[in-house]
Amino acid sequence: MTRGERRMLLDVTAMLARGTSRAERRRRRLLTCCAALATFFLLGAVNLLLIRGTTYTAWAGLVSEAGLRPGTALALALLVVPVLALLHQSGRVAQATQERRLAALRLAGATPRDVRRLAAVEAARIGTAGAVIGGIAYVCAQRAAMAALGVRDTGRYAIAPWVVPLVLVLVVAAAAAVSLLVSRHVVTSPLRVARRGARPHPARATMIPLPIGMLLMVVGALTNSIDKVGTPLFVLGAVATLLGVVVGASRLVLEGARLAGRRARRPETLLAARALEADPRAAGRTMAVVGLVVVFGTGAGAIEWDVIYNASSTGEPIERFWLVSFGLTYLALLFALLVAVTALVVHRAESLLESGRSMAALAAVGAPVASLRRAAVRQTLIAASPVCAAAALATLVGMTPTISATSLPMIAWTVGRALLMVVLAVAAAAAVTAASGRLLSRAAAPERLRTE
């Protein structure tokens, strides 16, 4: 690309940014927030890894102790996963809402490659704004926290100046990469924007990492007494289990949809099952993040019981370190769940933009809008239930040697915690879908049948 072409590309991107609708501006603000959150968490993770030395405190051990900082940094890095899922889902909505603008560019002589470049440049511009906001917010928040807590050695905990631009560049590159990834399955013609042919259903092989992870976790727990064998195997199994939940979520959604379709007794259930069976990948991407929340929530339950049991057996109160740690864990799980259900709302908007005319046709031939809303809720239940149940079951099976070697109350506590996480995750997803029923009502309006 020549210098003149690059300049023209930037000029066209700036021109398109000025002539956007209110919905497009809301989408851009959402993308900016995603980039800012990703920058904030990545800066926190890198900052923790660069701190040296240990200072023992009653409540800030997750930051001050060298042995605990890598785990805290990993937790912050994992919080980027739901943010990236939301960023990806928002990018897909952008492709559905930019139909007229992209088609006009093709009429003006732009090639499909030029259109994808424009989308990538626009995503990089939005990502830059979000990354800068996130970087400034992190530095200000860190300075304010150290001042409020009376930290004297601020130079030891403050983030290194050279880290900030590196993380900003990484976030901007990730935003552009997500835009290019989303546009792979879009055909922009001079008349319209359309999705390419439906991708093949997820293969059964995507489920392989899940049982492998469970097996490694069990073997690692059984060989925990062997030095440098048990713990690495358990950690490797946990990573494989997380990968299995993410990769196998779409296949779980497909199998759940097929089972629900075969046993459907009401038209709403059959409609929901067949819609999921036609495109399980879209729902699987969102439900994978919900499944990760269930995995971490179930695993935290076993640690909680151990702490509570030790405190009750000794008659001493729970240490402040554990109270702070559990509080931060709950906040992280709540944040991840909120981001995941937000991505679910965005996914609903995308699916209604693409299939709105079908919904309008169903309403026109007599299908009540209330029935279509019930079908949407059942579609979420069918998608979320198998993923969340498999995530909880995999975690329980992996921890079986650990929890079975203890008392019956711990087993009941851990199993109850897993069931609670499944119920909360599925209920949150269904509640968000029910609350977004107004989107479906708009999509089912008779005006959507009009061809322009």
Image: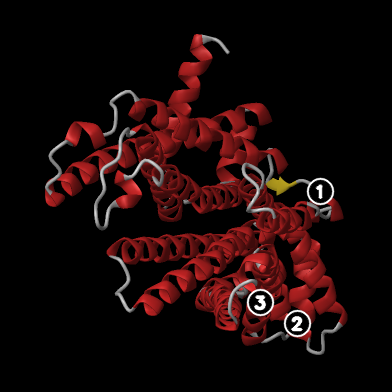
Q: Quadrant of the N terminus?
A: top right
Q: Can I make out residue 188 in this image? A: no
Reading the image, the residue beneath label 3 is 381
Q: Tell me how far mark 2 sits from mark 3, CA to CA.
A: 10 Å
Q: Nearer the viewer, mark 2 or mark 3?
A: 3
Q: Tell me how far mark 3 sits from mark 1, CA to CA.
A: 26 Å
Q: Quadrant of the C terminus?
A: bottom right
Reading the image, the residue beneath label 1 is 197
**What is the number of the mark on residue 269?**
2
Horizontal relation, residue 251 to residue 351: left or right: right
Residue drawn at point x = 30 percent, y = 75 percent? 316
The answer to which quarter of the image holds residue 320 is bottom left
Q: Tell me how far mark 1 sits from mark 2, CA to CA.
A: 25 Å
* Amino acid type for the residue under numbered disc 2: Thr
Question: Where does the image place residue 423, in percent across and percent down from the top left?
Answer: 58, 79
Residue drawn at point x = 74 percent, y = 75 percent? 272
State which tag comes first along the sequence, 1 or 2.
1
